[in-house]
Image (cartoon, grey):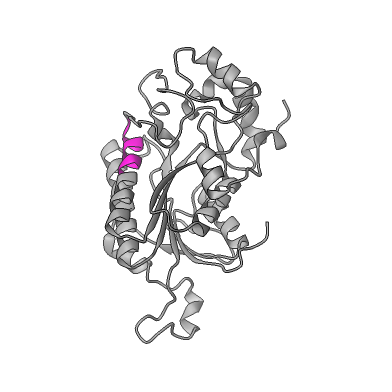
């Protein structure tokens, strides 16, 4: 895919994590300049990592007015009052990535406070585009206690999200913060991505045969996933699409992780769960229809491109 006509200056939080280490190279390939805020360096030749504690509001405000590289001190001043260039967008992926990494209260505090700090700083600094990572877990099954059914299929952005776990609740709180600030700062776009199970390129051969041949194990992910590189495309499309205020998008691949038609499988595996519309033959139940129709997302990395079953 060709690079964007005019690259943006993007601050990306959590870029050294599983998703970020693929999304950032995609954004760089599209012509964007990226600064990574993380506690662990990202091994990328053109992306500098600024070690930042995002639960500290002062550090966040400072990082969002930082140089993008140590070498940038030699550049001419942007203006008499601002030595560095303006930031066009913030992409906030940094978080405790699931339950049981830290105690629940720390997971909630870290995820919610960091998201609040990033959105607040971006809005008050006049940054007009913020993209935050929400989660598939908000649909309430992934980390539910015991076996729980979805309310209906497909899972779309107007679904009544009612998770019982701390991680998913922290992500819903992040969405509410985003909605609040988008209303408070008219003209600011804040898009929340409900990201599916992220799959890195090497994981197709390693994990997907099990997913495909034992589909019952994928109920928690709604038989859906997102290729880490396709997630980069979604982030880039969000950067390009302006003027929508607060929005939620399911960030998943178009194709399910099933090897049988989606409707057939759902009717057999989940007979008590209503199906509210006809799904495409192999459409993922955690549907990205909104991302396709509004952003123009086109899946480039379906699993069957890499796995033979």
In this view, 307 is above or below 48: above
In this view, 28 is above or below 205: below
**Which region is colored magenta?**
165-173
Whether residue 251 is visible = no
Quarter of the picture holding the N terminus: bottom right
Q: Is residue 90 left or right of residue 3?
A: left
Quarter of the image where one finds residue 83 = bottom left
Q: Is residue 225 left or right of residue 73?
A: right
Q: Is residue 290 left or right of residue 100?
A: right
Whether residue 125 is visible = yes
Q: Residue furthest right?
A: 308
Q: Position of residue 52 (x, y in %)?
A: 37, 61
Q: Main secondary structure of the magenta part?
A: helix
Q: Position of residue 191 (x, y in %)?
A: 42, 50
In this view, 19 is above or below 208: below
Quarter of the picture holding the C terminus: top right
The residue under the point 46% across, 81% down is: 73
Q: Viewer-proximal residue, 274 or 148?
A: 274
Q: Viewer-proximal residue, 69 or 294?
A: 294
Q: Position of residue 68 (x, y in %)?
A: 47, 71
The residue under the point 54% across, 54% down is: 237
In this view, 143 is above or below 94: above
Q: Position of residue 164 (x, y in %)?
A: 31, 28
Q: Is residue 296 left or right of residue 138?
A: right
The residue under the point 44% across, 85% down is: 77
Q: Is residue 31 magenta?
A: no
Quarter of the image where one finds residue 128 = bottom left
The residue under the point 37% across, 87% down is: 80
């Amino acid at each position: 895919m060709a690079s964007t006509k005019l690259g943006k200056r993007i601050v990306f939080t959590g870029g050294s994590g599983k998703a970020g280490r693929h999304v950032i190279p995609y954004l760089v390939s599209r012509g964007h300049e990226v600064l990574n805020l993380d506690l662990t360096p990202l091994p990328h030749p053109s992306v500098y990592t600024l070690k930042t504690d995002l639960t500290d509001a002062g550090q966040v405000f400072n990082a969002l007015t930082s140089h993008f590289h140590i070498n940038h001190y030699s550049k001419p001043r942007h203006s008499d009052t601002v030595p560095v260039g303006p930031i066009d967008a913030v992409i906030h992926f940094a978080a405790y990535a699931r339950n049981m990494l830290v105690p629940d209260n720390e997971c909630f505090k870290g995820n919610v406070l960091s998201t609040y700090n990033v959105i607040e700083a971006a809005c008050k600094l006049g940054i007009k585009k913020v993209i935050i990572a929400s989660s598939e877990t908000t649909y309430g099954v992934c980390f539910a206690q015991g076996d729980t059914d979805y309310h209906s299929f497909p899972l779309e952005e107007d679904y009544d999200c009612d998770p019982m776990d701390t991680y998913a609740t922290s992500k819903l709180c992040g969405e509410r913060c985003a909605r609040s600030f988008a209303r408070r700062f008219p003209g600011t776009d804040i898009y929340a991505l409900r990201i599916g199970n992220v799959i890195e390129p090497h994981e197709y051969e390693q994990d997907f045969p099990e997913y495909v041949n034992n589909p019952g194990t994928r109920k928690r992910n709604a038989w859906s996933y997102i290729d880490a590189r396709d997630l980069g495309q979604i982030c880039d499309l969000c950067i390009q699409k302006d003027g929508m205020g607060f929005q939620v998008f399911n960030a998943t691949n178009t194709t399910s992780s099933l090897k049988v038609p989606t409707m057939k499988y759902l009717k057999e595996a989940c007979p008590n769960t209503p199906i509210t519309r006809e799904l495409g033959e192999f459409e993922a139940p955690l549907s990205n229809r909104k991302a396709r129709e509004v952003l123009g997302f086109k899946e480039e990395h379906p699993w069957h491109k890499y796995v033979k079953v």
